[in-house]
Image (tube, rainbow, N blue to C red):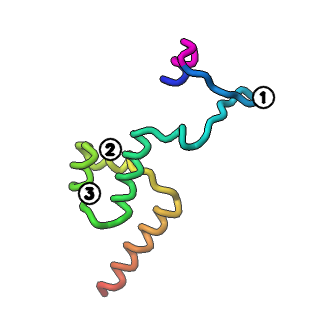
Amino acid sequence: MKQKKKEGLSEMEVERNDKGEVLMPRYDCVTTHTARRSGITNMYLSHKFTIVQMMHVSGHKTQKTFMDYIKLSSEEIADEIASMSKKESDMW
């Protein structure tokens, strides 16, 4: 939204394809928020920290908002489920 506003005010020049879609290098799409979200997701996937510790770092107050915030692919979710079921079978 900020980019559209800047573009409208002629503060930002963007290149568009014939369909009107904005063309920009991927590195220009990365913001501090993107890096923050990726960092928290990678912390989660490392299994080195508790959810409470990660919530403290990210500033989330509830576990639900934290879990909505981290970005997991379907493959990563499947890996999480597989590792949890393996831990349970190792206990028995």
Q: Is residue 34 above or below residue 7?
A: below
Closer to viewer: mark 1 or mark 3: 1
Whole-Å distance between the Cαs marked 2 and 3? 12 Å
Of the numbered discs 2 and 3, the one sitting upstream in the chain is 3
Closer to viewer: mark 1 or mark 2: 1
Determine contact: label 1, label 2, CB under 8 Å: no
Which residue: 37% across, 45% down?
A: 36
Q: Residue 27's image quarter?
A: top right
Relative image position of residue 31 (x, y in whole percent): 45, 38
Q: Which range of residues does the magenta coloring cover?
A: 5-11
Whole-Å distance between the Cαs marked 1 and 3? 46 Å
Of the numbered discs 1 and 3, the one sitting upstream in the chain is 1
Which residue: 49% across, 41% down?
A: 30
Q: Mark 3, residues whose alpha carbon is within 10 Å: few (<14), some, or many (≥20)?
A: some
Q: Secondary structure at mark 1?
A: loop
Relative image position of residue 1 (x, y in whole percent): 50, 24
Relative image position of residue 52 (x, y in whole percent): 21, 55
Which residue: 39% across, 79% down?
A: 86
Q: Is residue 91 above or below residue 62?
A: below
Q: Mark 1 sits on what residue?
A: 18
Q: Which mark is residue 51?
A: 3
Determine contact: label 1, label 3, CB under 8 Å: no
Residue 32 located left or right of residue 92:
right
**Was residue 54 drawn as part of the magenta stretch in this picture?**
no
Residue 62 located left or right of residue 10:
left
Q: Mark 2 sits on what residue?
A: 65
Determine contact: label 2, label 3, CB under 8 Å: no
Quarter of the image where the C terminus is located: bottom left
Which amino acid type corresponds to the residue marked 1 in the rendered image?
Asp
Q: Secondary structure at mark 3?
A: helix
